[in-house]
Amino acid sequence: MKLYRLGMLPGFDSMLVFHAMAYLGMEGFVLVSPCEPIVTLGYFQDMKTGVDRDYCRRHGLGLMRREVGGGTTLLDRNQIFYQVILKKNNSIIAGDALALYRKFSQPVIDVYADLGIKVRFKEVNDLLTVNGDRKITGEGGANIGDCIVFVGGILLDFDYDTMSRVFPAPNEDYRSQLFETLQKNVTSVKRELGYIPSREDVENSLVRHFQGIFGSFEEAQVTPDIWAKARELEAFYTSEDFLASKRREQTGFKIASGVHVYENRHKATGGTIHTVFEVQEDCLGKVNLYGDFTFLPKERIIDLENSLAGTRINREEILHKFNQFFKYNEVECPGITPEDFTQAVMGGLPSIV
C-alpha cells in the first residue's frame, strides 16, 4: 500500500488528491492538511441551506462540493486528514458500509488513545470522547470511480466562531445558539489536553495503527497525472453548476390546481433527510432526497427518487416503495431505514392530504 505524506497543501488540493486518485483507480493512504481554510459541501446537500455563501466570499473562504456525503465542513491547518482509497474489489472493504466505518475507525481510536484521549465509535460515522461525550472526529465514505474512499481527520484545534458563521442563519440570536451548541458538542485535541502535539507524532501514530489493516507502507509522491486530474476536478467541484446541482429549495406552495410542492426534514441516526417533493392530485410527482447522510453508491439516489414518482399518498404504499428499492437494489444508507425515508416524506404533508 502506498503512503502519501503530503504535509500542507493549498486548500482545495488537500481534498482533490483523493478524488483524483479514486478516478484514476490508484489505491493509497493519504495524510494531508490544507494551508488555508476552505468550506466543503456534502454530496447530497443543498447549497442554499448548507452554507452562508456571502460570509464565505467576504472572508475569502473557498467553497467546493465534495463527492462524499455528510454535512458542511470547515477545513483548516489544525486538522490532519487521513484518506483511504481502495478499489472496489479489494478484500479489505468486504462487508457493509457500517462494518467499513467500524474497521477504519479503530486505528483512529487507537491514535487518540496514544494522545491520552479516550474515544469511542458512535454509529454511523462519528468518534466521541468517552469523557464528555463530545464529537472529536467525523468520517465519511463514498464510491468514486472504481474505488471506495474513506476519509476523516484528527482535530487538533477547532475554530468555533468561523464554523458558526459558515452556516446560514436568520438572525444573530440563532447564530449565537449555533456557537454555543458547537462548543457544547464538539471538542479537539487542544481542548482535551491543553496543548497541540507535534504533527509528526500524530502522523506517525496514524501510520503505525493503519498498518494493522494494510501492512507495511511504501512512501510515494503525487504524480503529474494525479495533479492533472485534480485540476480538472477542481474546475468542476467549484463550478456554480455543481455547487447548486440537483437540489432545490421550494417549500409548501401551490403550483397549479391539484399540484403542490412540500418539504420536510427528518432526523435519523445516520443523518438528516431533507425532502422536497411534488404532489399531483393524490400521488407523488418529482421527489428530491438530500441531506447529510451517506448513500452508496451515491448515483443511485436518483434511481430511488425516480422510483417514487406516481406512488399514491399513503404511508403503507410509500414505505413499500422504499422497502422494495432497498431489497432489490445493492444500495446502503447506514443509519437510515426505509421507515426514516417514509417519515421524511409523510412528515412534510399537511394533515388534509
Image (cartoon, rainbow, N blue to C red):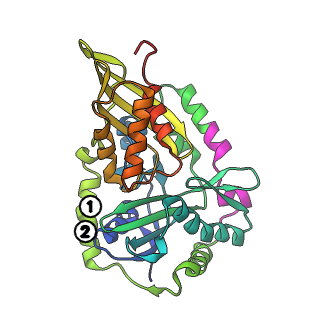
Does the CB distance between marks 2 and 1 fall below 8 Å? Answer: yes
State the mark number for residue 69: none
Please, is residue 176 above or below residue 217 in the view?
Answer: above
Secondary structure under tag 1 reads: helix
**Residue 247, how many percent across, how many down?**
31, 38
Tell me if mark 2 has few (under 14), some (14-19) or many (20+) residues whose alpha carbon lies within 10 angstroms of its own: some
When the figure is inspected, residue 86 is found, relative to residue 328, above or below; the finding is below
Query: Which quadrant is the N terminus positioned in?
Result: bottom left
Q: Amino acid at mark 2?
A: Lys
Q: Quadrant of the C terminus?
A: top left
Give the residue drawn at x 26%, y 14%.
258
Residue 156 in sight here: yes
* Residue 267 lies in the magenta stretch: no
Residue 97 appears at what percent x and percent y?
A: 49, 60
Q: Position of residue 219 (x, y in %)?
A: 45, 86
Pick the front one: 76 or 280: 280
Among the 4 quarters of the image, the one containing residue 91:
bottom left
Which residue in the structure is indicated by mark 2? 229
- Mark 1 — residue? 233
Estimate the spatial distance between the alpha carbons at disc 2 and disc 1, rounded to whole Å.
Answer: 6 Å
Range drawn in magenta: 180-197
Depicted 262 relative to depicted 131: above or below: above
